[in-house]
Amino acid sequence: MNDPSDPSLRALFRAAAEHGSREATTLPVARVVERGRRAHRRRLALATVTAGVVAVLGVATAASLAPGPDPVLPATSPSVPAPGPGPTHRSGPLPRETENSTPPGPGGATTEGRRTRPPTASGGTTAPMAPPETATTTATTTPPG
């Protein structure tokens, strides 16, 4: 059936080629230009939309990664101080004693240039002092029973 020597199949292809040649016409130049312009506009619109989406996603990503203010917690009653250094926390060197200050008494401690003594429990033992960052808590001791 696909034998190239078959004269009828060859004749059919020649007839189809002649018919196509007679019916084929070239398009007017204006129509070809208009189709090219439409394709160009579609490509530009797609590129613009893509660039806009990339820009919006970049801004959204940068905004989500940027450190923002800490969220404000609702007030509680009574107020509980936040963990960590408070507003009274000072960075830098601690105050130094001066040579012309008087030496502390037995068991005395220095606080901001003033001499103080730690509280003592009944029985003459010294109660442990709270660190300066947790000055709102008080240390209590019970006498040995």
Image (tube, rainbow, N blue to C red):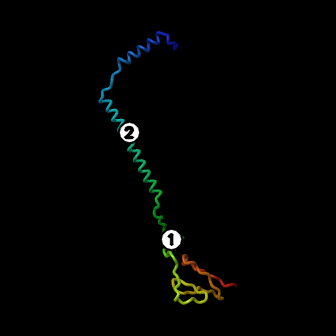
Nearer to us in this view, 31 or 109: 109
Which of the two labelled residues, at mark 2 and mark 1, occupies the earlier sequence position? 2
Q: Quadrant of residue 122?
A: bottom right
Three-letter code, disc 1: Thr
In the image, taking residue 55 as reference, residue 124 lies left or right, namely right
Q: Measured from the top left, where is residue 114 in percent x and y?
A: 52, 86
- Mark 2 nearby-residue class (10 Å; few <14, some 14–19, many ≥20): few
* Residue named by callout 2: 43
The tag on residue 76 is: 1
Residue extending farthest front: 99
Disc 1 secondary structure class: loop
- Mark 1 nearby-residue class (10 Å; few <14, some 14–19, many ≥20): few
Q: Quadrant of residue 15?
A: top left
Cα distance, mark 2 to mark 1? 59 Å
Disc 2 secondary structure class: helix
Q: Measured from the top left, where is residue 123 in percent x and y?
A: 66, 88
Quadrant holding the C terminus: bottom right
